[in-house]
Image: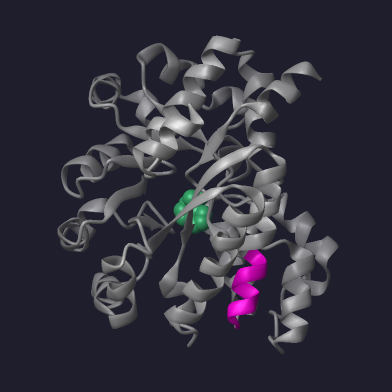
Amino acid sequence: SPIHDFLKLLPKCEHHIHLEGALTPPVLFQLAQRNNITLPQDDDAFQSSEFLLQRYQRFTSLDDFLHYYYIGMSVLIHASDFEALAWDYFEHASADGVHHAEVFFDPQAHTSRGVDYRTVLEGFQAACKRATQELGITTELITCYLRHLPVPDCLETFHHEAVQESYKSGEIRGIGLDSSELDFPPHLFEELYTKAKGTGLRLTSHAGEEGPSHYISSALDDLQVERIDHGIKLAGDEALMKRVATQATMLTVCPMSNVVLRCVKEIKDVPIRAFLDAGVKFSINSDDPAYFGGYILDNYCAVHEAFDLSIDEWTTIARAGIEGSWCGQTRKDEMH
Ligand code: ADE
Ligand code: ZN
């Protein structure tokens, strides 16, 4: 359709994609076999790629999804596994019209299994380099900390020699905070964020996905983040919505993720219209495309289907995404 072609051609930036969330069931089984990883025997979902995909269509919550997400990534061992995973994502992103991608990964989810941080980074960096050279996609890497793990574990990872090296060299642009939200409020990670800010890193955090709107204000006040990942619970808090609009904090919204993880009933319930009306800046993203049934263009199309946005509104969204990116001004000017 003409609108699909328009949305595909619109210069898109993606700011909320977990590279581990790009692991499709076929690749998961292939790597499990190649790396001799035993998948859970007591869960029928792991009997085949088709069963697993069916199970993904019945997620009941963020935690239900995360259970499969952490098992899935256990098949990633070698730098070449991480490279292939990220490359698969960049190929999809390119086909969808992504010009710039700021991608998350979870160092602790790998180092805790005995996979070296350098191995993970080496693989992802190789894919990023290829994405720029062969697809013209510029990239930034963001390390996410797992909020369900003890705070000292996060601090230890932050201070790890190889991690510090990647921060100080500029190989990593910023940090984020992800995983199970409700029981792990933002303020617990204040020290981590203060230290990251002191290192010159950009700051974002998942907040207001399942958690209440005061997790969003806590991320802004206690963690001093400049972006909020998800942030859909902002819509129920008129005063906070005004603040976020005024200070031009960008939300990285993930509509299909919100439906699949039952944060909302349908795409129509994602507060896209409320954000546009309040002047809240946001980008539209895929989150974990291999788990939620669609890449970025599917998310754009789903939003269009639900809200019938005008060309002007789509242009506003695309511009906000470019402005909210953590690339240099020269690259922003190129994309505008
Ligand atoms: N890790 C991967 N995807 C996530 C999400 N949507 N929320 C929190 N943690 C995540
Ligand atoms: Zn996420």
- The chief SS type of the magenta part is helix
Residue 45 shows in this picture: no
Asked if 272 appears above or below 82 in the picture, the reply is above
List x then y, in percent, for residue 227. 33, 40
**Residue at the image point whose x is 20% and y is 53% from the top:** 187
**Residue at the image point whose x is 43% and y is 42% from the top:** 209
Q: Is residue 70 magenta?
A: no
Q: What colour scheme was applied to this rendering of the protein? A: one colour
Residue 222 shows in this picture: yes
In the rendered structure, the answer to whether residue 19 lies left or right of residue 26 reads: left
**Residue at the image point whose x is 51% and y is 49% from the top:** 138
In the rendered structure, the answer to whether residue 320 lies left or right of residue 268 reads: left
Q: Nearer the viewer, residue 252 or 71?
A: 252
Name the image quarter holding residue 19: bottom right
Q: Which residues are magenta?
A: 78-85
Quadrant, the N terminus: top right
**Residue at the image point whose x is 79% and y is 66% from the top:** 26
How many marks on residues?
A: 0
Asked if 206 appears above or below 264 in the picture, the reply is below
List x then y, in percent, for residue 177. 35, 56
